[in-house]
Image (tube, rainbow, N blue to C red):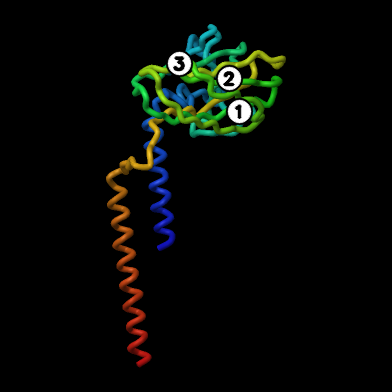
Amino acid sequence: MKTLVWIASLIVAMALGASARANNLITDGDFSSPNQGGGWSIYYPGIDGWINTNNDGIEIGYSTIYGLPCANSACQQLEVNANLFDTDGQTVNGLTVGKTYDLSYLYGGRTSGGPDILDVYFGGVYLTTDTGSIGSWTLNSFSIVATSTSETLIFSSEVTDGAPSYGNEITNVSLTTAVSLTTATPLPAALPLFAGGLGIMGLVGGWRSKRKNTSASLAAA
């Protein structure tokens, strides 16, 4: 029975995770398209909603060639420093003014090329500065309130004494509507049926156990 409960919990978690990905307002936040086949490419002026603002293009590559582990099924990321200390971003439309959204992304530092510093903005508001995290991913999470129906998420490399074409890696960029404690999260239709099945199995198991205990008592008498 414990195994069945664990399986049910796993299915619910996977369903909620899939739901969050489906509701992501960022286009190609894991940079899985186009597939790089283990290499990298630079797209001008950008691709899939991602735009470079200083005419240096958007560089998408396979994570391990930058010295970072795979963080998604495609194992791909954006290197903000394509050939220069770049500024890359994406404009998100269809927001509701005054509504709270959850923003998150992974930041990683390349294992060669010198120091990297990345400034992050949403809707023109400064959020944070990322640095370090060499060879590993660091999760960044923010709760933000939309002030316009259209806002731009910006990742901007600071000029350092490191190599301009190396570093400031990001992936798994997500912007979703914040879920309040009073808001019920709809589950796939199959899950209630599955949960109901588990409940019935639990009742049957309890009935069998009770029957065994009763039989044992009668035998003892």
Relative to 147, is 107 above or below? below
CA neighbours of label 2 inside 10 A, class few (<14), some (14 to 19), many (20+): some
Q: Residue placed at 61% from the left, 25% from the top?
A: 130
- First reached walking from the N terminus: tag 3 or tag 2: 3
Which numbered dot is residue 108? Answer: 1
Pointer 2 residue? 119
Comparing 188 with 155, the one in front is 155
**Left or right relative to 178: residue 60:** right
Q: Residue placed at 37% from the left, 37% from the top?
A: 19
Q: How many marks?
A: 3
| Label 2 residue SS | strand
**Left or right relative to 187: residue 92:** right
Cβ atoms under marks 1 and 3 closer than 8 Å: no
The kind of residue on which mark 1 rests is Gly
Separation (CA) of disc 1 from disc 3:
21 Å
| Label 3 residue SS | strand
Q: Pinpoint residue 78: horizontal percent, then vertical percent.
A: 54, 22
Q: Quadrant of the N terminus?
A: bottom left
CA neighbours of label 1 inside 10 A, class few (<14), some (14 to 19), many (20+): many
Separation (CA) of disc 3 from disc 2:
21 Å
Relative to 54, is 123 above or below? below
Question: Quarter-wise, where is residue 61 in the image?
Answer: top right
The kind of residue on which mark 2 rests is Asp
Q: Pinpoint residue 141: horizontal percent, then vertical percent.
A: 51, 32
Comparing 28 with 35, the one in front is 28
Pointer 3 residue? 47
**Left or right relative to 217: residue 166:** right
